[in-house]
Amino acid sequence: MISPLRCGLALIAILTAACSVAWAQEDRVSRFDDYEEYARFMDETIEARDYITLLNRIGAADEMTVQQMQGLKAQLDSLIQSDLDQVTVWRQIDLGGGMQQEVRSYWTGDVSYLHVATLLHKRPDGLVLLEVSMNTRARNVFPFD
């Protein structure tokens, strides 16, 4: 029998793979006016476990059905059962040319963690979120290394 944790991790991996094609296309990327808007959006949606809003903002609606998004949310909610009330940015790497890699970790008082790695591009017209990887294990969110 597959544990709920493994199932949740598998769904997150599938989400990352399914959405990477959409994120790579210029007309589907998620744009923000600046880093502060991006950070506020990430923190507010992830801390509240509002994964469907996050999925829609990053273009997953083109790659996933509503039922698939709801299934992913249900899996994540079974793994993380209360709002994530703590956050830290513990990795930021300037890759050059306006590209930046970042890892944020969110957690609860009951020791549930969600780690989120992003690939960002700072452009004259704002900040573009190119890729996202989420996982409950930190070592599994480094697809850019």
Image (cartoon, grey):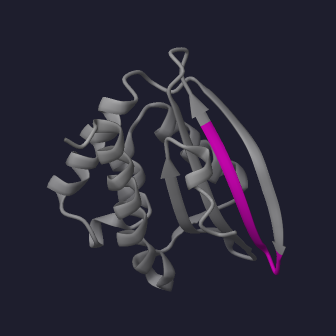
What predominant SS class does the magenta segment belong to? strand
Residue 116 in picture, x, y percent from top left: 57, 49
Residue drawn at (72%, 63%), measured in percent from left and top?
Answer: 101
Residue 107 against residue 114 in the figure, above or below: above
Could you say which is closer to the camera, residue 20 or residue 11? 11
Residue 87 against residue 129 in the figure, above or below: above
Displayed quadrant of residue 76: top left
Displayed quadrant of residue 93: bottom right
Q: Is residue 42 left or right of residue 16?
A: right
**Residue 28 visible in this rendered orientation of the protein:** no
Could you say which is closer to the camera, residue 9 or residue 15? 9
Displayed quadrant of residue 48: top left
The magenta region covers: 96-105
Residue 41 in picture, x, y percent from top left: 55, 46
Q: Which residue lies most toward the top here?
A: 109
Residue drawn at (33%, 48%), measured in percent from left and top?
Answer: 52
Residue drawn at (42%, 80%), measured in percent from left and top?
Answer: 21
What quarter of the picture does the N terminus occupy?
top left
